[in-house]
Image: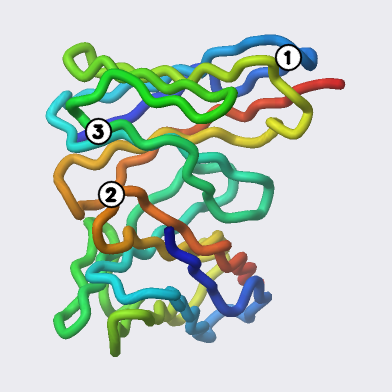
Amino acid sequence: SAVISQKPSRDICQRGTSLTIQCQVDSQVTMMFWYRQQPGQSLTLIATANQGSEATYESGFVIDKFPISRPNLTFSTLTVSNMSPEDSSIYLCSTNPTGTDTQYFGPGTRLTVL
Amino acid sequence: KQEVTQIPAALSVPEGENLVLNCSFTDSAIYNLQWFRQDPGKGLTSLLLIQSSQREQTSGRLNASLDKSSGRSTLYIAASQPGDSATYLCAVEETSGSRLTFGEGTQLTVNP
C-alpha cells in the first residue's frame, strides 16, 4: 500500500492569486497523477507527473495554468495559477506503488476561490 | 474515448439490505477496473481491483464482478450498514500505468 499526504487540506483564496499544493508519498513511485473534482462531479485527470521529465497534460489543461513539479520519486506539487471561482474544486494526487496496480489517493485539497 | 457510467446515481436503502451498484464502460479494451469509496469531503479509498483477466474479487461483504466483453461491472454489498453510506466510484485503467477514467459515482445512504 501507499500512504499519501497533501498540504494544505483546504484553503480559501482570492481571485487572481496562486496556490501550490504539495503531495508526499511514503515510498518511491514512478508516476504521480493530479486529479480535479469539481463540486458534485467525478474526478478528471489534470496531468501525469514523471520524475525527471515534463508533466503530461490532459486535454483542456495547460502548463501555464497548472504548473507541476516532480523533483524526486516521493514528492510532487501542483500550482493553480491566476485563480478564478471556477477553480474551486477538490484537488487530489494519486499513485500506484511499485508492484501493484491499485491506485492510492491522497486526502485531497479543498480549494475555494472567492 | 472511454466513457464510464454508473447507475443509479443515488440509492437509499434500509440497514441490512443487500444491494448492487452498476458500472458500464464503452471500450472493453481495459487493463483493470477499480471500485473506490469516497466519504464527503475526503479522498478516495480503494475497495477492490479486478484485472481484465478476472471475473470477480471479494473483500468481506463486498463482491465485485467484471464482464469485460459486455463492458459491465457490478459491486455487490451484502448486509448493508449505516457505515457503508458514501459515494462509490468505479474507474477503468486502459493500459498499465495509465490514467483512470471515472464514472460519476453512486451516492449510497443506508438508513438505520
Classify mark 1: residues with Cα within 10 Å, few (<14), some (14-19) or many (20+): some
Residue at mark 2: A101
Measure the alpha-carbon separation of dots 3 and 1: 30 Å
- Name the residue: 35% across, 49% down: A102
Tell which tag, 2 or 1, sits nearer the viewer: 2
Residue B13's label in the rendered image is: 1
Residue closer to the observer: A40 or B98: B98
User: Mark 2: which secondary structure?
Assistant: loop
Residue closer to the observer: B68 or A21: B68
> The C terminus of chain A lies in which quarter of the figure?
bottom right
- Discs 2 and 1 carry the same chain letter: no
Residue A10 sits above or below residue A64 on the image: above
User: Mark 3: which secondary structure?
Assistant: strand
Q: Amino acid at mark 3?
A: Gln
Measure the alpha-carbon separation of dots 3 and 2: 9 Å
> Can residue A46 be seen in this snapshot?
no
Residue B106, position in %: x, y?
A: 55, 27
Dots 3, 2 in contact, CB < 8 A: yes
Classify mark 2: residues with Cα within 10 Å, few (<14), some (14-19) or many (20+): some
